[in-house]
Image (cartoon, rainbow, N blue to C red):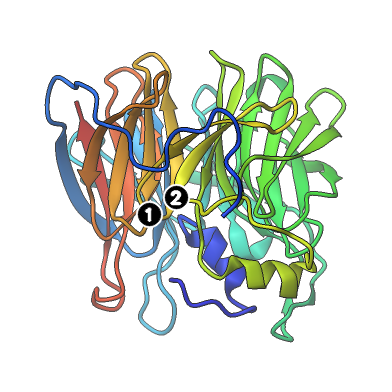
């Protein structure tokens, strides 16, 4: 997963669960001492399907929905959405997809699941009650010549962010140069606007619903602020992080949290494919950075395992969860003090996270390692405290 080629790099940052000077407010580089936690977490794990990526928890349906992109080549599993029993992780139903799905966003109140068809520049819409596909949003129909010489869509999809109050879905479109932000009207299922100017491989997105701001990050250490009323890109900050892969917004503090992955060899890709010849690294990654969205200033750095990918904030319980792809762990922090509470072993490669807000149970997709048999099923885990 660390072997880079220009033709496959965007696929890598889509599926990955993809030394500067320290700034004031950073924590020490070593991992923080574990704080007191009352009990060892209980973990159950179940192999469910080929090529699993993001997952969401539906309180209304009492179900987990998991994107299973399937495999490649003859005999490989077809793409589908898996519906799981959240208590047992047993597969209750399968929803066939015509296109491979990776990212997910759930509108539980409206009973709609949005599936990002990463390589097809489209979003599939599913009725969660009936398990039927009810719509398809084609973001663009025009293809361009890719670095490998093949005709491909100009942007790939990764994260989907729902804004139910404004009836919108936000989807950063990844590109080596000038990524964009797609804005979809969830009532008409039409593209409302395409906002350009998001730099080298825009990956993360998080919504401040009360403040009317959408934050978008990229892999050249930039944090963008979009006004959700006007859909204008208000500002871009050169942030205190390097590879801002995924974002979360902390409504209590007004800060943006980002996984700073530390992906090897990215510098060469930035220069060769992004044209960023003068870019300078802003750290070695393997951390979560806490950013002031007003100016991108790094307020704290939280050491994680190797290759942090997803992060999830459970604000009522003051817990921050981080998947560490290369370490094969999920680290659990106190979201206030940033103290390490637990390290949960989940080899091979923990990827995405979802929360049951009532019980505090956390669900994790786990990718297989290189030594796993070809086309073998990947896993979902449940962590209870």
| Rendered position, 284 above or below 257 | below
Specify the quadrant that holds the N terminus.
bottom left
In three-dimensional space, the C-alpha distance between marks 2 and 1, rounded to whole angstroms, equals 5 Å
N-term-proximal mark, 2 vs 1:
2
**Residue 363 locus on image (x, y percent):** 31, 38
Q: Which residue is mark 1?
A: 306
Residue under numbered circle 2:
286
For the point 73% across and 80% down, the residue is: 147
287 over 275 or under it: above or below: above
User: What is the crowding at mark 2: few (fewer than 14 residues within 10 Å), some, or many (at least 20)?
Assistant: many
Measured along the vertical axis of the image, is residue 139 above or below residue 364?
A: below
Q: Circle 2 sits in a helix, a strand or a loop, which is it?
A: loop
Q: Is residue 129 visible?
A: no
- Give the residue displayed 60% in from the left and 36% down from the top: 23
**Residue located 30% across and 60% down the image:** 49
Which class describes the residues within 10 Å of circle 1: few (<14), some (14-19), or many (20+)? some
Q: Is residue 37 left or right of residue 106?
A: left
Name the foreground residue: 60 vs 285: 285
Q: Is residue 248 left or right of residue 142?
A: left
Query: On the image, which quarter does residue 51 sit in?
Result: bottom left
Q: Identify the image quadrant of residue 313.
A: top left
Quarter in which the C terminus is drawn: top left
Q: Circle 1 sits in a helix, a strand or a loop, which is it?
A: loop
Q: Position of residue 187 (x, y in %)?
A: 72, 31
Q: Residue at x 41, y 23 (%)?
A: 335
Instruction: Assess whether mark 1 and mark 2 are in contact (beta carbons under 8 angstroms).
Output: yes
């Amino acid at each position: 997963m660390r072997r880079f080629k220009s033709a496959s790099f965007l696929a890598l940052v889509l599926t990955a669960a993809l030394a500067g000077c320290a700034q004031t407010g950073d924590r020490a580089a070593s991992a923080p001492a574990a704080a007191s936690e009352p009990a060892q977490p209980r973990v159950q794990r179940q192999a469910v399907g080929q090529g699993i990526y993001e997952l969401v928890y539906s309180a209304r349906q009492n179900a987990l929905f998991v994107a299973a992109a399937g495999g490649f080549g003859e005999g490989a599993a077809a793409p589908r959405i898996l519906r799981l029993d959240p208590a047992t992780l047993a597969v209750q139903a399968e929803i066939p997809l015509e296109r491979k799905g990776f990212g997910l966003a759930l509108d539980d109140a409206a009973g709609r699941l949005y599936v990002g068809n990463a390589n097809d520049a489209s979003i599939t819409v599913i009725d969660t009650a009936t398990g039927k596909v009810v719509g398809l949003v084609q973001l663009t129909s025009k293809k361009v010549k890719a670095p490998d010489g093949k005709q491909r869509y100009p942007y790939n999809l990764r994260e989907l962010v729902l804004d139910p109050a404004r009836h919108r879905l936000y989807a950063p479109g990844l590109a080596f140069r000038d990524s964009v932000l797609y804005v979809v009207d969830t009532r008409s299922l039409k593209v409302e606007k395409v906002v350009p100017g998001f730099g080298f491989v825009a990956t993360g997105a998080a919504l401040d619903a009360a403040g009317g701001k959408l934050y978008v990050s990229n892999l050249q250490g930039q944090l963008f602020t979009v006004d959700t009323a006007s859909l204008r890109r208000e500002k871009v900050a050169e942030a205190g992080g390097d590879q801002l892969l995924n974002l979360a917004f902390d409504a209590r503090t007004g800060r943006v949290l980002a996984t700073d992955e530390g992906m090897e060899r990215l510098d060469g890709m930035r220069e060769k494919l992004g044209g960023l010849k003068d870019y300078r690294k802003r750290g070695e990654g393997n951390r979560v950075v806490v950013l002031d969205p007003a100016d991108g200033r790094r307020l704290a750095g939280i050491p994680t395992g190797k290759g942090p990918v997803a992060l999830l904030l459970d604000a009522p319980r003051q817990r921050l969860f981080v998947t560490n792809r290369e370490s094969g762990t999920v680290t659990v922090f106190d979201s206030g003090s940033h103290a390490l509470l637990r390290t949960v072993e989940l080899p091979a490669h923990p990827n995405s996270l979802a929360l049951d807000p009532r019980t505090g149970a956390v669900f994790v997709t786990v990718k297989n390692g290189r030594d796993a048999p070809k086309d073998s099923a990947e896993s979902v885990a449940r962590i209870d405290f």
